[in-house]
Amino acid sequence: MAKKKLTKIGRYKILGELGRGAMGIVYEAEDPALDRIVALKTIILSDDAEGRKEFHKRFFLEAKAAGKLTHPHIITVYDFGEEDDLAYMAMELLKGIELRARMLKGPISTVEAVDIAEQVADGLGYAHERGVVHRDIKPSNIMLLPRGRVKIMDFGIARVRVADHKTSTGVVLGTPRYMSPEQVAGSPVDHRSDIFSLGIVLYEMLTRASLFAGADTPQILHNVVHVEHVPPSRLNREVPSMLDFVIARALKKDPAVRYQDTYELAADLRSCLAELGGRKRTEKDTDGDQDVTKTVKLDVDTEKTRLAPAARAIGSDTRLPLSRQFDSSAALRRLSAPTKRDRDLLARPPQSVGLLRRLRNDPGPRLLFIAVLAAALVGSAIAFG
Amino acid sequence: MKTANAGATLASVVFLKIQEFARRPVQEQARLKAQLEAVVAVTTAELAPASRIVLDAADGAAIVVLGDPKGALRLAERALAATAAGLPLCVGVNHGAVQLAPGGRDEDGMIGDGIAVAASVAEFASPSRLLMSRSFRDAMADASPGLESGVFPAGVFTDAGLRTHELFSPDGRVAERRRTRFLALSVTAVIGLVGAGVAARVSAEGHQKFVDGVVVKIRQTIAQGEKVLGDVIEIVRWQRRS
């Protein structure tokens, strides 16, 4: 494909190249029938006849499913087809910036990040409702358009590509950093996998940290499956605690305890947005007021702070962080510098209670003892007195 | 407040776990967490600040109580009462080893088998129920003998690490029954021992002699009583006259 310059694919007239990916090239093209400029995504077909047949079947199935998705937050698929060794998909041409590029450009405000995630969740919810799973949600598949609009790209194609590689080589391809644990494990994947991936994207927008980064792919995949995230509010002080809960739920390793519905995630993100909006207005309203009391967040060493584990995951070497809502310093001082009395009290294992202690402190046996003693004395007096 | 030298100590750990926390909507999670914080604030207020450390868990909170198992039990029972106010809690209590997490910073929190077992016990607890480990029951008995009699065996449970835990659950009726039992035993003992004394005397002296002796004793006692009463009346009259 690279050897000869393409001028036409199907009925589309190639105007220029928009980008290149591992599976093909994206062109800017013109649809002469409708006099419309489109983005034409191409995929190079396999030379193997059997593989090609299988791909063909899946591609058309997925492209049809994607073509049915008409939503303000999903790129519109106009047409798809096959020509020579290329499969192609004509889509709406978006003039904007990829989220990936936007993230590289500079920090994204919390409000903007939540707004983007909410729009993506809304679009995904629509697709999931129709049985279409994206499977490759990542910043480069999210397009930011003018006036704050967001569109999800690559529906259908992502799935075909992944399935193709899985069946031919037994290896699941995708973007490891944004994969869900079930994708990594090669287990059946459903819409909850997209929720996990969107959770990662939101986390990275909020914190500018690469959540499951690793030196190589196996390390990244290991991190996806095993590493728990630091709550984003500990890395970015602007993040409200409710977002911690949202992200924690989206990033549950077990799909059964993750959000079960993408619309539910979208609704929660809207609530966060409302909370953030309120906060924003308050800041604006109080601008310039020197006497305003400001909330000061504690300075926490993020390197040392980890997410508190749930009861099920607590082992004897699992650290539970101190609650920041309660002052435990007095007891901590007692533990770190114990007095002699404390050393005796806190190091002594429970002793079995002897008879004398029992009689002295336990009212039941004490009553019985006194009654027996008194009755024995009276009985003796009667018998021998 | 260096933690480097701090070794393991034994403490009671009350683990308050919100039921099905992970499955709840996020807004509800935030509400329940705030409610739990309020419950912890109220219940820990009864303990001296130097006796309690509050730790965060994803689905609840753990309170480490130093040297006061009775206080830990009271805290657990009071926290459980909050279920009536719409906070769905399971409570697990254990007495075991805890220590400041190594690392030299207080923000690091705490680790230890005491916490892990309390969390496991809370996992076993059914909704709105309090379970305690045998070690906590023993610690309670050691601190306040007799208090352990208010719990009954709830069964033996095996956790995910195949470790078995013998668990107990408090029940006020068990303590009440025990009190009644001891009272009945005391009454029986009194009747038995006094009766035995009487029987011994009767068998030694014969029935008639014993009855006569008792009648004489009663008459003597009545006479003595009348004399004492007469003396008291005389004293009162004398005081009135003077």
Image (cartoon, helix red, strand yellow):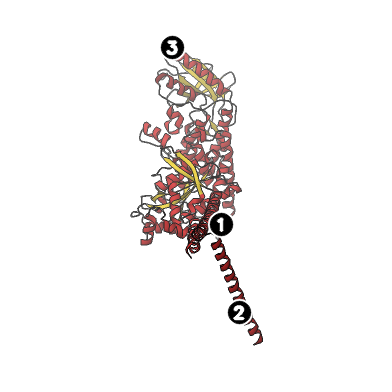
Find numbered disc 1 in the image and state the secondary structure of the residue it sits on: loop
The residue that disc 3 covers is A49
Q: Earlier in the sequence, mark 1 or mark 3?
A: 3
Q: Chain of mark 1?
A: A
Q: Residue furthest top?
A: A49
Q: Residues within 10 Å of mark 3 (few under 14, many from 20)?
A: few
Between B147 and A135, the one nearer to me in the picture: B147
The residue that disc 2 covers is B231
Image location (x, y in percent) of residue A36: 57, 23
Are the residues flagged by discs 2 and 3 in contact, CB closer than 8 Å? Answer: no
Kind of residue at badge 2: Asp
Find numbered disc 2 in the image and state the secondary structure of the residue it sits on: helix
Between A3 and A104, the one nearer to me in the picture: A104
Image location (x, y in percent) of residue A211: 43, 39
**Marks 1 and 2 share the same chain:** no
Residue at 51% over, 35% down: A257
Q: Is residue B46 visible?
A: no
Between A162 and A70, the one nearer to me in the picture: A162
Kind of residue at badge 3: Ala
Residue A288: mark: 1
Q: Is residue B232 left or right of residue A378?
A: right
Image position of B118 with respect to B193: above or below: above
Image position of A41 with respect to B78: above or below: above
Q: Chain of mark 2?
A: B
Mark-to-mark CA distance, 1 and 2: 95 Å
Mark-to-mark CA distance, 2 and 3: 130 Å
**Marks 1 and 3 share the same chain:** yes
Label 1 or label 3, whichever lies nearer to me, is 3
Mark-to-mark CA distance, 1 and 3: 71 Å
Between B178 and A232, the one nearer to me in the picture: B178
Find numbered disc 3 in the image and state the secondary structure of the residue it sits on: helix
Image position of A332 with respect to B126: above or below: below
